[in-house]
Image (spheres, rainbow, N blue to C red):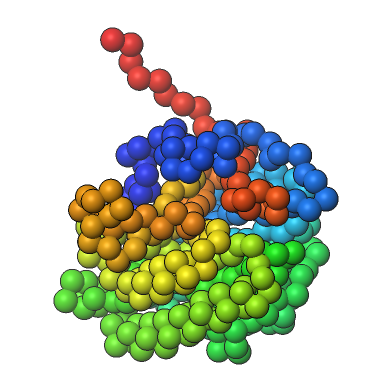
Amino acid sequence: MTRGLTRRALALAGTAAVCAVTSIPLAAVAGPGSAAPAKTPQTYEVGLFGDMPYGDYGRAHYPAVLRSMNSADLAFSVFDGDIKNGKEPCYATFDGSAQAAGQPDVYRYALARFNRLKAPVVVTPGDNEWTDCDRTSIDPHFDANGRLAYERRLFYPTNQSLGQHTMTLTRQSKAYPENTRWQRGRVTYLTLNIPGSDNNWVNPYRDGDSQGPAAESHREYRARNKANLAWLDASFAAAKQANSQAVMIVIQADMWDPYAAADNALGHYADTKAELARLVIDYRKPVVLVNGDSHSFEVDKPLADASTTNASGGDGPNVIENFTRVTTFGDYQNHWASATIDPKDPNVFSFHQHIVAANVPEYTPPAAP
């Protein structure tokens, strides 16, 4: 989702790092530019990135992100959506729009760069490359469902991931090939197509036709939401069957975005959050949700139970403590994050931010008093 400011822009990246450190045990989050801990034969590192490149600035800085990731010893990476910003048109070659405009196909551009990564990379869709393509504020604009269909053909043609080295994935179906699952050791991984922009729900009473055809978006949402919930349930069942120590879920949307909440644009994540809470409570082992959409690195615990009185006797629910959410960098913050998976660690996951030195801007200090 493209906004005038990123969700955390008012707090800026430094505050995001503080939030990350205070949200979970200190040992679980590394500081700026810090290396992941030394690996044992059982540990491995997973790259986490998304929401890039955004515009000319992002395209100029994105290669340094990919080089940094290629210099790391990654088992695989996951891209959590948004291959472009939400202002530029969704040009493609299959309908001649890219050729007519003299512009690159944004999907093939993204695909070529994913395939520069040495390790396997799994990609989940973001709202900017399909949900938002039919916004009337974008000239020219295109059918959202047609763009998603094209992305599916291009990014998910087989059971293999992207990247120079690939890995085998289980795909939910031909209709929803972007919903994937794979196993590495005793951790189950899965992706779900849950984009920003209220999960592709257009509110015609609020937005008129500016966000695209409402009836079309409602039909698409209902079918995909049903498939997502089924895949979420099936994946936790698979994790139990495999006796997995932990589960990682990757989506694009920030389902707790306070700015979207203020716009009443989070309602169509309610089914997912409720089912996730039920599954995580029942699972009783570490579960991590990785999302993009808000563009600043953060680690927190936003999932709560259905209690009206919490364990201390106060008003409100209990935080579900075996659930952790990681939000990745994006937009003008062209950096990446990673997770170290250590089966000997009771938390299984620890998280690290990788600040790409070439992409750090010149800072303007405040005036002296």
Q: Quadrant of residue 163?
A: bottom right
**Quadrant of image for the N terminus:** bottom left
**Residue 249 appearing in the image:** yes
In this picture, residue 199 sits left or right of residue 65: left
Q: Can you say whether 205 is above or below 316 in the image?
A: below
Q: Position of residue 13 (x, y in %)?
A: 44, 37
In this picture, residue 274 sits left or right of residue 308: right
Residue positioned 57% across, 33% down in the render? 32
Q: Position of residue 145 (x, y in %)?
A: 45, 83
Q: In the current view of this chain or complex, which residue is farthest to the top?
A: 369
Residue positioned 80% across, 46% down in the render? 40
In this picture, residue 186 sits left or right of residue 54: right
**Residue 336 appearing in the image:** no
Q: Position of residue 2 (x, y in %)?
A: 38, 57
The residue nearer to you, when weighing 260 against 116, is 260
Q: Position of residue 43 (x, y in %)?
A: 75, 51
The residue nearer to you, when weighing 107 against 37, is 37
Q: Quadrant of residue 263?
A: bottom left
Residue positioned 35% across, 60% down in the render? 304
Q: Can you say whether 240 is above or below 226 in the image?
A: above
Q: In the current view of this chain or complex, which residue is farthest to the left?
A: 205
**Quadrant of image for the C terminus:** top left
The residue nearer to you, when weighing 178 against 348, is 348
Residue positioned 31% across, 53% down in the render? 311
Q: In the current view of this chain or complex, which residue is farthest to the right?
A: 41
Q: How many marks?
A: 0
